[in-house]
Image (cartoon, rainbow, N blue to C red):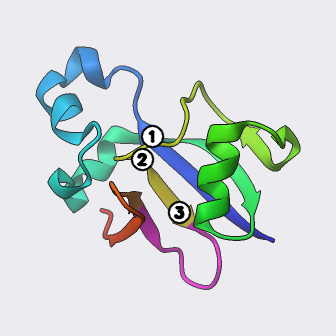
Amino acid sequence: MATFTVHQTREDLHETHTDDFFRLSFNADRYNAEDFQFFNPVARVEAVDMEHVFHLMNAWNDLDRVRRYAPLHSLSVGDIIETHTGEHEYYIVDRFGFKKIEVC
């Protein structure tokens, strides 16, 4: 098992930065490194890989593997997964699979 941190857009984003909220919601192609400021860590997940993280955060059938930090929603396109193996790497959930990204 490995540890992953899930980052989702801040709760206040739709009220304070409406344009950024709609630009980032459900569209991995519009993400820029400086957009990471609009995300908060919401959960720590113990999983085999990112596909397993996706399953756990959508099926909700193994809650012992998901530690919630903040209100969250099911994992979807535009959310970010941080890996904790070696150097921390960040991946955005894309329409099909995951895309490695840079963060500021």
Q: Residue furthest right?
A: 64
Instruction: Assess disc 3: are there few (<14), some (14-19) or many (≥20) residues with their C-alpha within 10 Å of its C-alpha.
Output: many
Q: Residue at x 84, y 43 (%)?
A: 62
Mark 2 and mark 1 in contact? Answer it, CB < 8 Å.
yes
- Identify residue for label 3: 82
Q: Position of residue 49 (x, y in %)?
A: 65, 70
The stretch in magenta equals 83-91
Which badge, 2 or 1, is on the more N-terminal residue?
1
Q: CA distance from mark 2 to mark 1?
A: 5 Å
Q: Main secondary structure of the magenta part?
A: loop
Q: Is residue 48 magenta?
A: no
Instruction: Assess disc 1: are there few (<14), some (14-19) or many (≥20) residues with their C-alpha within 10 Å of its C-alpha.
Output: many
Location of residue 14 with respect to 101 vertically, above or below: above
Q: CA distance from mark 2 to mark 3?
A: 10 Å
Residue type at mark 3? Answer: Glu
Q: Residue at x 55, y 35 (%)?
A: 74
* Quadrant location of the C terminus in the rendered image: bottom left
Helix, strand or loop at label 1? It is strand
Q: Residue at x 40, y 31 (%)?
A: 10
* Quadrant location of the N terminus in the rendered image: bottom right
Location of residue 58 with respect to 46 vertically, above or below: above
Location of residue 19 with respect to 55 vertically, above or below: above
Helix, strand or loop at label 2? It is loop
Q: Is residue 33 left or right of residue 99?
A: left
Q: Is residue 91 left or right of residue 87?
A: left
- Identify residue for label 2: 79
Looking at the rendered image, the disc whose residue lies closer to the viewer, 2 or 3, is 2
Q: Residue furthest left?
A: 19
Q: Position of residue 82 (x, y in %)?
A: 53, 63
- Identify residue for label 1: 8
